[in-house]
Each structure stands twice: as structure tokens, then as C-alpha cells.
Amino acid sequence: QKEVEQNSGPLSVPEGAIASLNCTYSDRGSQSFFWYRQYSGKSPELIMFIYSNGDKEDGRFTAQLNKASQYVSLLIRDSQPSDSATYLCAVNRLAAGNKLTFGGGTRVLVKP
Amino acid sequence: DVKVTQSSRYLVKRTGEKVFLECVQDMDHENMFWYRQDPGLGLRLIYFSYDVKMKEKGDIPEGYSVSREKKERFSLILESASTNQTSMYLCASTRPGFRHNEQFFGPGTRLTVL
């Protein structure tokens, strides 16, 4: 079992709809969780981080964390073509110190 | 604004060459990281450094070495480049405890080994 798992996609979403991305992790000692967006040929850029159970909203993005079920999700509301990218989930595990463990990423395609 | 820069965006080398990839950050971060990213395999940690002259192997250190002589600079060295080291290389940095260890990435170096 991979430490951080994501569906590779592509997740195809009509413009204006909600894109829902999921990430599961195996280490119960994980403390903080990050969503990065990566455009093709570019480096990852942070969208959000979350460390407490529940929802965290920032603009059109909402991160949801459920530590009991060991998953973290990202919702993108009112999806735009500019949201088309690969979204990487990253986890900071207690045993890993300051290192992050990344999932393989979910590719999102927003169609006009 | 945190800035992480990498010496080259694109690099083409020949098999057997010694290759240096440089990374510089301007935010006085203690921790720096080198990853490679390949389709279907995600980001994989090669090496990281938690302070000057300190280094630790990541998940895939074979064929690589690193150097950190100054806090702002972290170099990745391919002692004898091979075709299976063709990849996108990403450098990142963080300050321990800052925003729960958020990592800031450089623009990446796409290395092709012929």
C-alpha cells in the first residue's frame, strides 16, 4: 500500500461545476496535509494546507480532513479552464520529521 | 516572497558526464530538498539537508550525491549520468515548523541524458 494515494485521473469537469479530489494516507501519525497545484511543465505551488479535522475554505477551494478515516479532499467550486492542472496531495508524517510524502497526483481537466 | 531558484531550466548531457544541479533559496531556510518527478511515479525524494553540511538520504539516493556548503545553496550531483536519470528535478526548501512544514519549490530543471 502506498503511503499517500490519489486517483490519477483525468477528472473531467464541466466549467462552473465542482471538482472533487480525494487523497488517502496510511500513516495515522500524519499531522499536516497539503494540496499543491502543478501546471504542465511547471513546479508545484501550494493551494492550501490543513491540520485539523473538518473543512477549511479559501476562495473557491475547500480542503476537508477526516483523520479517523485517513483521507483529505479538495473541492474546487465554480471550476474554470485555468484550474486544469495536476493536483498533488502531500502529507507530513510525524515519523518523517520535516519531510513531506507526496501522492502521485490527480489530473483535472475543466472543459468550457 | 520566498524565492527558490535553480541554475537551469533545461539541460542536455551525455551518458557518463558529471552533472551539477544548483538550487538557491533566499529565505534563510534550514531545510532543503531534491526531488525527481517522473510520469506515473510522482515526486520522489532523492536527498535532503536539514542544515549546512548536514544531509540525509531520501527514497532514491542511488547514483546521486549532494553538497551543502552554504545555507542558501544545495547542489545535486550526478557522478556519472545515465539515461535512466532523465527526469524533471525539483528543489524545495522550508523552515522547520513554518506553516506546518510547507515546502516552497523552485522552477525545476528538466534533464535529458543522451
Image (tube, coloured by chain):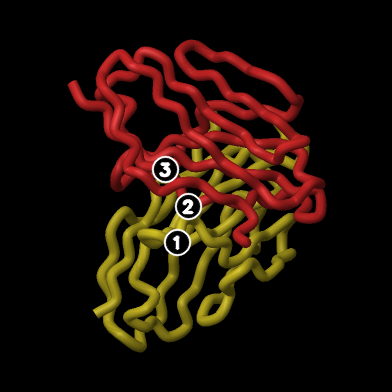
Q: Measuring 46% from the left and 77% from the top, which residue is drawn there?
A: B78
**Which residue is farthest bottom?**
B16
Mark 1, secondary structure of its residue: loop
Q: Name the residue under label 2.
A: A104
- Near mark 1 (Cα within 10 A), the count class, few <14, some 14-19 or many ≥20, is few
Q: Do the residues labelled 2 and 1 touch (CB within 8 Å)?
A: yes
**Is B28 in front, or is A69?**
A69
Q: Mark 3 points at which residue?
A: A106
Q: Measuring 64% from the left and 56% from the top, which residue is drawn there?
A: A3
Q: Name the residue under label 1.
A: B41
* Total tally of numbered discs in the picture: 3
Residue A85 in picture, x, y percent from top left? 34, 36
Same chain under badges 1 and 3? The reply is no
**Looking at the picture, which amino acid does disc 2 mark?**
Gly
Disc 2 and disc 1: Cα gap in Å? 6 Å
**Looking at the picture, which amino acid does disc 3 mark?**
Thr
**Looking at the picture, which amino acid does disc 1 mark?**
Leu
Disc 3 and disc 2: Cα gap in Å? 7 Å
Quadrant that contains the C terminus of chain B: bottom left
Query: Numbered disc 2: what chain?
Result: A
Chain letter for red, please: A
Mark 2, secondary structure of its residue: loop
Residue B89 in picture, x, y percent from top left? 43, 59
Query: Numbered disc 3: what chain?
Result: A
Q: Measuring 31% from the left and 53% from the top, which residue is drawn there?
A: B9
Residue A21 in picture, x, y percent from top left? 48, 33
**Is B73 in front, or is B58?**
B58
Is the residue A105 above or below the residue A80 in the image? Answer: below
**Is A8 in front, or is B47?**
A8
Residue A37, quarter of the rendered image: top left
Residue B13, quarter of the rendered image: bottom left
